[in-house]
Image (spheres, grey):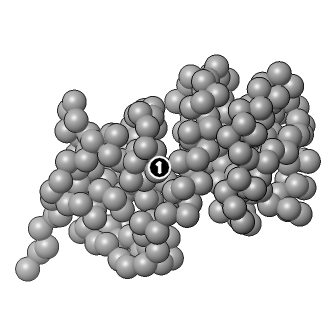
Amino acid sequence: MAESAQTILVVEDEQAIASFVAAYLRKDGFTVRMTASGREALAIVGVDAPALVVLDLMLPDLDGMEVCRRIRETSTLPVLMLTARDDDLDKIAGLEVGADDYLTKPFNPRELVARVRAILRRSADKRRPDGGVLRHGDLVLDAGRRECHLGDQEIRLAPKEFDLLWELLDHKGLVLTRDQLLERVWGYTFAGDTRTVDVHVRQLRRKLGDAAPIVTVWGIGYKAAPAPAVAE
């Protein structure tokens, strides 16, 4: 399918915002479907899956969190979530249920289009790990299964959390800037919101605790911590 024929589903109950977003996406060559209903969005995804969903957090019938959660039960369809508040709790919750990225209202429509293209490019990017295993002490990442284990315990990671951790462990000893991580993990080729990286790092540290192999290099970015020594 040609890129110009890719369909974007816009799920937004504020008609002015939905029309505004749709106009910019169409101008950039996308086909756009719109709905104000979370339930209708799930029906559309189930019958005729779009290339990506732009999903508002606050919907009148079924909120964006639940819509995203249900999409993730059966699909890896990319989701860009729109939030009304610049609140990390909303962003973390959205990422936890599987959103690929988020934008806070009000936003520049050109940035939304750029993020849509970045997410789609990343979804098709062959650099995404699709095989192999990385180990860091008791931490094991299995790219083929998309699983993370800490000792005998499986740690459930959101897709971008997994990709971010893989990128850091795959470049041990190297400091990666936030912009480099945005480009490598999210596919951004523009100056994105680097807080996206910080939110994901916080989530990884929360889930992995003391085993989180991430070192902050202040003013620059992050790197993987040295692997713990193995007992003789």
Would you say 80 lies left or right of 13 here? left
- Where residue 195 appears, as percent x and y from the top left, is 42, 32
Q: Position of residue 24 (x, y in %)?
A: 71, 32
What residue is disc 1 on?
Answer: 186
Q: Which residue sits at x=23%, y=54%?
A: 224
Residue 72 appears anywhere in the view: no
Q: Position of residue 144 (x, y in %)?
A: 47, 78
> Is 167 or 61 nearer to us in this picture?
167
Image quadrant assignment for residue 194: top left
Circle 1 Cα neighbour tier, 10 Å, few/some/many (<14 / 14–19 / ≥20) = many
Query: Element type at marker 1?
Result: helix
Task: Examine the rendered structure and indicate whether residue 103 appears above or below residue 77.
Answer: above
Write the residue at 22% across / 30% down.
219
Image check: 157 left or right of 74?
left
* The C terminus - image quarter: bottom left
The residue nearer to you, when weighing 64 against 227, is: 64
Determine whether 70 is above or below 180 in the image: below
- Quarter of the picture containing the N terminus is bottom right
For this rendering, which residue is in front, 173 or 107?
A: 107
> In terms of image quadrants, where is residue 162?
bottom left
* Foreground of the two, 86 or 208: 86
Q: Amino acid at mark 1?
A: Trp
Write the residue at 41% across / 33% down: 191
Please report the residue visible at 69 percent of the width from the left and 61 percent of the height from the top.
2
Q: Is residue 224 visible?
A: yes
